[in-house]
Amino acid sequence: MKIYLASPRGFCAGVDRAIEIVELSLKAYGAPIYVRHEIVHSRHVVNSLRDKGAVFVEELTEVPDGSIVIFSAHGVAKEVWAEATRRGLKTIDATCPLVIKVHNEVNRDYTQGYELILIGHAGHPEVIGTLGQIPDKFHLVSSVSDVEKLHVENQRNLSYVTQTTLSVDECRDIVAALHRRFPKIKGPHQEDICYATQNRQNAVKELSKHVDVILVIGSPNSSNSNRLRELGEHCGIQSYLIDSSSDISLDWIKNAKAVGISAGASAPEVLVTEVVDYLKSHGANEVEELMVVEEDVEFSLPKELISIQPLSRQVSA
């Protein structure tokens, strides 16, 4: 059995930044540091940060007065910021800059009088945060059929944005449906699928040309990891989402000549290494990396943490 590793895979710049924000905050202010929602959707990462003194909560009501709270990479609604201000909480924002870009587009278009449409998955933290940027005239669509059922006030004054972690192909179909139904609709210059999501999807497409089975490492609540698994299936390859090597069933790989491994943008490389070692212990004898594109993106830290970031990061920033 041969192992093919998709590249790029795993942590993106936004996830790297979010994790570093929690670690530097613990270093600067000491434990406990409160984090609203999982900082990123990875059980491994969350448990590791919890062991270092991070306390993960779902609502600000769980944060004691006067505490420090970090907002996750997915972003939050404006009312969450307002509540933190009312309570005098010290806030540190770990929202991915690419999500902030979408928020800025939403607020700009709303100010200019547009009725807005968000392409995304209901209930996802990023979607909740984006919908919470404006008080009204915001519609959520998750499929082409949602577009057909949509009721808007003014078809000539519509704008759309997208959740950053959707499938590129899925998003394209919905955008096409919006343009068919509302020819005057305004969208971003390019769809707001983040660079890391697109790169990882392109890598899985390449992976599917070489393997019999694809294992995508990522937590069940990770949107971009689920999209990678779905993409593998769409390419005709049996694909499975796993949190770690312990989730692998030997039935999946017993007849496979080649197994592909990818990892969602929140999955650390240590989990990839564990899966590779597991497959080697069950007959894999060769590992090859399939490089699609090299990533060199890096996002700046919040100003309150810049002075304590590692020297190597300061030099490269």
Image (spheres, rainbow, N blue to C red):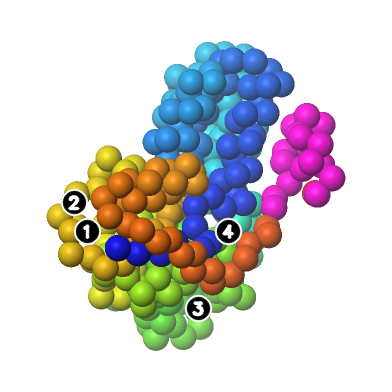
Q: Amino acid at mark 3?
A: Ile
Bounds of the magenta span?
298-316
Q: Residues within 10 Å of mark 4 (few under 14, many from 20)?
A: some
What element does badge 3 sit on? loop
Question: Which residue was labeled with disc 1?
Answer: 253
Q: Quadrant of residue 113?
A: bottom right
Indicate which disc residue 102 carries.
4
Residue at image point 58% right, 37% down: 19
What element does badge 2 sit on? helix
Q: Position of residue 68 (x, y in %)?
A: 61, 21
Q: Position of residue 270 (x, y in %)?
A: 47, 42
**In the picture provided, is 43 more to the left or to the right than 304?**
left
* CA–CA distance in space, label 1 to label 4: 40 Å
Q: Nearer the viewer, mark 2 or mark 3?
A: 2
Indicate which disc residue 185 carries.
3
* Vertical order, 48 against 149 (above or below): above
Q: Position of residue 222 (x, y in %)?
A: 39, 49
* CA–CA distance in space, label 3 to label 4: 17 Å
